[in-house]
Image: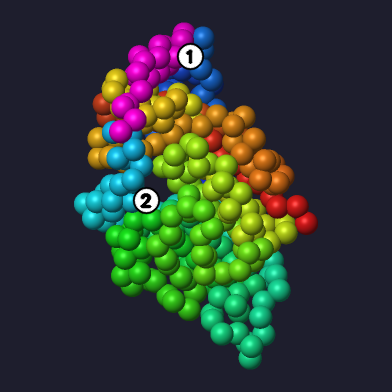
């Protein structure tokens, strides 16, 4: 019997396990991990970045993209709905504590005293920037023991609307809400120091760099002692950064796409400073330098992502 795609995804190995030892074999697989760049490749990337970042966007134009950021993302989700992102089943290999069998129940409110389903949960998760639910619904599917409760937010109302309209959305196990986490003093639907895991996956890059620090500090306050933030986002010299044309650069490593959405490309050091500056302890901070292959067209594409895990001290 053929294994279902979701089951296959759940069992796949962590990233970084498929290495290209012989360049002649590059088209044998669709992706290779830990691909080392030689000096010429680094120089070529720096030259492309120097060209597309040679001048910054006019401040007034850049301000427009800041003020209308949620509108641009709302339009994005209205256009693509749930057809753009694949479900992130890979999360369970990178963060096994998200699976039912790994959940460690923390203190949960007694059923007779609980006023909301989330208060009965022994494990509480927040996904920031939930989009159309590519993480939320795999989480609900995986946690069949119902020990967990998933909060999910996005600052694009259309995204939250799409999540709530999904037939798999269960208010007894999940709560979606509109929220801009880059704002000061956000009113979350849960108390501070109450979350076990916060997922920040390809989200921080859409926020203005000057708001990174306050955003991470605000999120860290929501974690209970021992709770973790799991982060994954774009790294420096990623293919997407090098493809931008001149005129699209807002500031260093911060660009605007053709649809008006923005994206920042991180370094490991700055992420370390951000998270440790918020009082969190580093458990993981690694570069996923991957070579993607289009075997049909014989094309190679170099992606650079950074994956981190930081813990709130007990």
Query: Which portion, as a residue range, is magenta?
Result: 40-60
Q: Position of residue 27 (x, y in %)?
A: 38, 26
Between the C-alphas of marks 2 and 1, the distance is 30 Å
Whether residue 205 appears in this view of the structure is: yes
Q: Position of residue 218 (x, y in %)?
A: 58, 53
Mark 2, residues whose alpha carbon is within 10 Å: few (<14), some, or many (≥20)?
Answer: few
In the image, farthest residue toward the front: 60
Residue drawn at the location 56% of the way across and 63% of the way down: 125
Residue drawn at the location 29% of the way across and 60% of the way down: 158
Quadrant location, the C terminus: bottom right
In the image, farthest residue toward the bottom: 112
Residue 270 left/right relative to 203 = right
* Nearer to us in this view, 246 or 168: 246
Residue 81 left/right relative to 267 = left
Residue 89 left/right relative to 14 = left
What label does residue 61 carry, if any? none
Q: Position of residue 226 (x, y in %)?
A: 72, 57
Element carrying mark 2 = loop
Q: Is residue 127 above or below residue 248?
A: below
In the image, farthest residue toward the right: 314
Q: State the scheme by which the image is colored.
A: rainbow
Element carrying mark 1 = helix
Q: Position of residue 183 (x, y in %)?
A: 47, 52
Residue drawn at the location 61% of the way across and 79% of the way down: 120
What label does residue 86 carry, if any? 2
Quadrant location, the N terminus: bottom left
- The residue that label 1 is drawn on is 42
Q: Nearer the viewer, mark 2 or mark 1?
A: 1
Mark 2 and 1 residues: CB-CB less than 8 Å, in contact? no
Q: Is residue 57 above or below residue 159?
A: above
In the image, farthest residue toward the left: 79
Does the magenta-highlighted stretch encompass residue 48? yes
């Amino acid at each position: 019997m053929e294994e279902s795609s979701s089951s296959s995804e759940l069992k796949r190995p962590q990233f970084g396990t498929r290495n290209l030892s012989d360049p002649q074999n590059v088209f044998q697989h669709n992706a290779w991990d830990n691909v080392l760049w030689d000096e010429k490749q680094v120089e070529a990337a720096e030259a492309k970045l120097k060209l597309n970042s040679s001048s910054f966007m006019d401040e007034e134009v850049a301000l427009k993209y800041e003020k209308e950021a949620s509108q641009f993302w709302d339009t994005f989700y209205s256009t693509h709905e749930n057809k753009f992102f694949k479900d992130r089943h890979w999360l369970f290999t990178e963060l096994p504590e998200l699976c039912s069998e790994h959940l460690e129940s923390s203190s949960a409110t007694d059923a007779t005293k609980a006023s909301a389903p989330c208060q009965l949960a022994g494990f509480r998760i927040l996904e920031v920037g939930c989009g159309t639910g590519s993480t939320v619904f795999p989480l609900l599917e995986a946690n069949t023991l119902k020990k967990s409760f998933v909060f999910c937010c996005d600052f694009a109302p259309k995204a939250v609307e799409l999540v709530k309209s999904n037939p798999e959305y269960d208010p007894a196990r999940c709560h979606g809400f509109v929220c801009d986490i880059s704002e000061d003093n956000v009113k979350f639907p849960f108390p501070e120091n109450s979350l076990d895991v916060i997922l920040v996956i390809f989200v921080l890059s859409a926020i203005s760099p000057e708001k990174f620090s306050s955003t991470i500090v605000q999120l860290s306050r929501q974690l209970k002692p021992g709770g973790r933030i799991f982060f994954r986002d774009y790294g420096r010299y990623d293919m997407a950064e090098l493809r931008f044309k001149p005129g699209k650069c807002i500031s260093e490593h911060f660009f605007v796409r053709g649809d008006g959405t923005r994206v920042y490309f991180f370094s490991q050091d700055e992420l370390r400073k951000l998270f440790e500056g918020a009082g969190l302890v580093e458990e993981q901070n690694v570069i996923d330098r991957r070579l993607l292959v289009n075997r049909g067209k014989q094309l190679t594409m170099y992606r650079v992502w950074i994956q981190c895990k930081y813990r709130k001290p007990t």
